[in-house]
Amino acid sequence: MTKKRVVIGMSGGVDSSVSAWLLKEQGYEVIGLFMKNWEDDDDSDYCSTRQDWIDAVSVADVVGVDIEAVNFAAEYKDRVFAEFLREYQAGRTPNPDVLCNAEIKFKAFLDHAIKLGADLIATGHYARVRENPAGNFELLKAVDASKDQSYFLHRLNQAQLSKTLFPLGNIQKTEVRKIAEQLQLPNAAKKDSTGICFIGERPFREFLNRYLSYKPGPMKTADGEVVGEHVGLSFYTLGQRKGIGLGGIKSHQNADGNSAPWYVARKDVENNTLYIVQGHQHPWLLSPTLNASQVSWISGQAPQIAELSAKTRYRQADVDCTFSATDNEHFSLHFDTPQWAVTPGQSAVLYQGDVCLGGGIIGSV
């Protein structure tokens, strides 16, 4: 019997490396594919592409799989980065990982893998796929709740999920590290990646400066008092506390005599005005509702149930909400408990228990 061929994205990190080994152990014919998605300054200190490729090749050698590199930089720039810049220029805060998964890792990569004769593709994401009795494919949270990445995968569709394996979905991250050590993988102690390549650990404002036009403008409090000048609305996100640049502005004091911190609360793009408020629980930072567009449902259809749970940012526990679809392209959520710093441009992702249903891009709140 011919083995099924799986093409796995190997990034040079521990997760995809252990995934490749697990697939081989399960009897698949495994081919590694290293994706190069960024070229503008990949020789800089911030972009680790060269070292990641060396690590991926070294791991492939230990695990015993073939590996090749494929360049998706043009597709990435066109489908992900251009949208990323458009959103920032409009004053929103996009999530490029969500777009990268939908457009590169499960589209350009999948197309390339099929050309290599793949029956299936795999990645090192922490998530699960299952086929339900009706023959539909469902995206589930990972068993390791602290590492679950279903939030970033919520735009995948039936065609993509039907071809996808997530070998780490049922494994704890601690176990993945143990396997890497036992196999003596050259990257067993490598730190997890904390960002997408083109940003990496670099100063974010400095990076955006190279690509966006920006205009300083007034920074105001909720009652309209001008307290400073912002450097450009694109460089701030709702709920931001550090790096606002208030200097020695006098603050109202808490009951204990300490100054309450300031937070970015609103952006008035039309008037190029940034609003800041004092105190974590200021009403302007709390949203009982949100509206979302650019909707994507994993099943292909909007949920039929109103009482669901949602995440409005990745590092957040699910919160109960009431869902209503206004049409195929829009939905609204009403939260039992107002949510903190709901941010236009980020994704609102819906769940029914462990099942990720899909989501949309947050617009007005």
Image (spheres, rainbow, N blue to C red):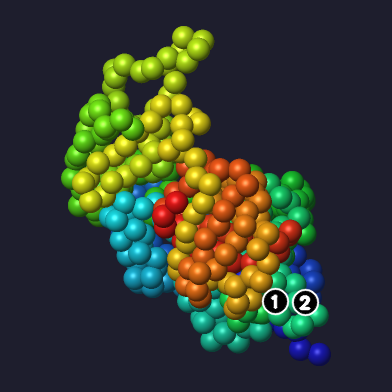
In this view, 59 is above or below 161: above
Q: Secondary structure at mark 2?
A: loop
Q: Which mark is residue 132?
A: 2
Question: In the image, 234: left or right of 193?
Answer: left
> What amino acid type is highlighted by mark number 2?
Asn
Q: Residue furthest top?
A: 257
Of labels 1 and 2, earlier in sequence is 2
In this view, 358 is above or below 112: above
The residues tagged by marks 1 and 2 sit, at their Cα atoms, a distance apart of: 6 Å
> What amino acid type is highlighted by mark number 1?
Phe
Residue 132 location (% of width, % of height): 77, 77
Say which residue appears at 73% left-offset and 51% top-offset. 144
Residue 218 location (% of width, % of height): 21, 36
Mark 1: few/some/many CA within 10 Å (<14, 14-19, 20+) = many
Say which residue appears at 38% left-offset and 17% top-offset. 252
Say which residue appears at 51% left-offset and 10% top-offset. 256
Task: In this rendered view, identify the residue nearer to me: 17 or 286.
Answer: 286
In this view, 208 is above or below 73: above
Task: In this rendered view, identify the residue nearer to me: 63 or 250.
Answer: 250
In this view, 179 is above or below 329: above
Residue 69 location (% of width, % of height): 49, 70
> Where's the N terminus, which quadrant?
bottom right
Can residue 234 be seen here? The reply is yes
**Residue 159 placement: quadrant:** bottom right
Can residue 39 be seen here? The reply is no
Q: Are marks 1 and 2 in contact (CB under 8 Å)?
A: yes
Q: Secondary structure at mark 1?
A: strand
Q: Which mark is residue 137?
A: 1
Q: Which mark is residue 79?
A: none
